[in-house]
Amino acid sequence: MIGVPVGGIVLLTVAVVILVVSGILTDYVVNLDYASPWALASSILLILLGSAAILFGASIWYLLLYKAWGVIQDGNASTTPGKAVGFIFIPFYNFYWIFQAWWGFARDYNRHIERHALNTPKLEASLFLAFCILSICNIILGLPIPFLQNTYLGYLAGLAFLVMFIITANKTIDAVNGLLDLQAGTISQ
C-alpha cells in the first residue's frame, strides 16, 4: 500500500531527471529540437508507469477507508462507507470531508468499541487529526504559489505527511483486522 505509490513517485522522478539531462525539459519548457528518441520514449514510459502506480496506491487507500467504515456499521456510525470515500472526490468540499472521513472514523471506531464493550485497543484520534491537517498542508504547499516557490516547506510537509500516512495506515489496518477477528470469534472479547 505504501511501496506502490512511493515507487510511482520514484519512477516519475527518474523520468523528469532523464528529460532534464537529455535537454528535453529546460526551465519548465519542453524543447524537442535535440530530443533523443530513446530519452523521450523511456521518459513517457516511466511517466505512464509511475502514474499507474500512484493511481493503484490511491485505489488501495480508498479501499481501506471503505473497509474501515464498513466494519463499524451498526446503525450508529456517522457516515456510510460509500459517503466516506465518495465525498472525498468533491472539489473543495474534500478539504472539509477528509476530517469527517479519517478523523471521524477514529472517533466513531472508539465509540463503537465502547458501545459494544470490545476488548481491543482504541485509536488515537489526534493522530488521525494530524494526518488530515498534514494532507491539506501538503496539497496547499504543493500548489505553485509564488511566495512559496523555491522553499523547502513543500518537501517538509510531504515528508511529514508520508510519515503520518504510514502510521495512520498501520493503525487503521490493525483496528479493522482486530474488529474482524472479534466478529469472527477468533479472539475473545
Image: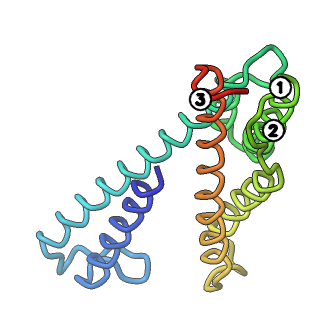
N-term-proximal mark, 1 vs 2: 1
Foreground of the two, 135 or 146: 135
Q: Determine which quarter of the picture holds residue 106.
A: top right
Q: Amino acid at mark 3?
A: Lys
Residue at point 66%, 30% (across, down): 179
Q: Looking at the picture, how far across and down is residue 42, in whole percent? A: 19, 65
Q: Looking at the picture, how far across and down is residue 163, in whole percent? A: 61, 66
Q: CA distance from mark 3 to mark 2?
A: 14 Å
Residue 104 badge = 2
Please give the residue where the numbered disc 1 appears in the rendered image: 78
Q: Assess whether mark 2 and mark 1 are in contact (beta carbons under 8 angstroms).
A: yes
Q: Secondary structure at mark 3?
A: helix
Residue 67 badge = 3
Residue at point 76%, 37% (across, down): 105
Work out whether 100 lies above or below 34. Answer: above
Q: CA distance from mark 1 to mark 2?
A: 8 Å
Q: Looking at the picture, how far across and down is residue 62, in whole percent? A: 56, 38
- Residue 93 shown left or right of residue 8 in the figure: right
N-term-proximal mark, 3 vs 2: 3
Q: CA distance from mark 3 to mark 1?
A: 15 Å
Q: Assess whether mark 2 and mark 3 are in contact (beta carbons under 8 angstroms).
A: no
Badge 1 density bin: few <14, some 14–19, many ≥20, Cα 10 Å = some
Residue 39 badge = none
Residue at point 84%, 39% (across, down): 107
N-term-proximal mark, 3 vs 1: 3
Q: Amino acid at mark 1?
A: Ser
Residue at point 37%, 68% (across, down): 10
Q: Looking at the picture, how far across and down is residue 133, in whole percent? A: 77, 58
Work out whether 165 lies above or below 186. Answer: below
- Residue 111 shown left or right of residue 8 in the figure: right
